[in-house]
Image (tube, helix red, strand yellow):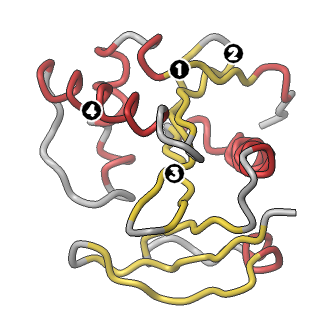
């Protein structure tokens, strides 16, 4: 995938059609890489959007939908969980090639927000990423809601 950063736009999560977000989050391929949850319906997707709007309004946090070539590709952000700021990136598999660009944008946001480090949790089913290992001060296993994750403590420059 030949990626032009100018083809990626980040919009507030509530600006996206809830049905498009619901379709994205209910995609089986995406669900394989997330903590298990019920399929979204029109009520639960609106509650999810409202929860992400609250996260976005929290000091040190930022949540955005990812639009690639005018299509919803996913969502991403910096969230405050369990006393730490963490990276969230959820991308439709047909857009996985933009993941590193999205991650770099999040690091830029983190620097703007004054963070020194962020955590990134990837299910153990995911491969270990060399570029993440290089920029992490620590990589270790964690358990979240009964699932094992590889956690990267990423330093923000």
Q: Which mark is residue 12?
A: 1
Identify the residue at horizontal 49%, vertical 50% (top origin). 79
Pick whichever of labels 1 and 4 is earlier in the sequence: 1
Nearest to the observer: residue 127 or residue 10: 10
Q: Residues within 10 Å of mark 4 (few under 14, many from 20)?
A: some
Numbered tag placed on residue 69 in the rendering: 2
Q: Which residue is mark 3?
A: 88
Is 77 on the left or on the right of 52, as rendered? right
Instruction: Say whether marks 3 and 2 touch (CB < 8 Å).
Output: no
Task: Estimate the x, y position of residue 89 in percent, counting from the top left.
Answer: 54, 48
Sequence-wise first label, 4 or 3: 4
**22 w.r.t. 84: above or below:** above
Label 4, label 3: how many angstroms apart (C-alpha)? 14 Å
Residue 57 appears left or right of 133: left
Which residue is tagged 4? Answer: 48
Q: Nearer the viewer, residue 69 or 51?
A: 51
Mark 3 is surrounded, within 10 Å at the Cα level, by few (under 14), some (14 to 19) or many (20 or more) other residues, namely some
Quick check: marks 1 and 2 in contact, CB under 8 Å? no
């Amino acid at each position: 995938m030949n990626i032009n950063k100018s083809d990626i736009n980040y919009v507030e999560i509530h600006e996206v059609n809830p049905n498009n977000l619901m379709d994205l989050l209910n995609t089986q391929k995406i669900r394989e890489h997330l903590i298990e949850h019920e399929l979204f319906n029109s009520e639960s997707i609106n509650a999810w959007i409202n929860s992400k709007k609250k996260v976005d309004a929290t000091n040190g946090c930022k949540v955005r939908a990812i639009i690639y070539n005018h299509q919803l590709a996913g969502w991403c952000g910096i969230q405050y969980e369990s006393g730490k700021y963490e990276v969230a990136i959820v991308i439709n598999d047909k857009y996985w090639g933009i993941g590193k660009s999205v991650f770099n944008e999040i690091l830029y946001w983190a620097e703007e927000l004054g963070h020194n480090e962020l955590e990134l949790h990837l299910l153990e089913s995911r491969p270990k990423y060399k570029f993440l290992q290089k920029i992490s001060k620590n990589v270790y296993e964690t358990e979240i809601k009964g699932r094992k994750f590889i956690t990267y403590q990423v330093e923000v420059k």
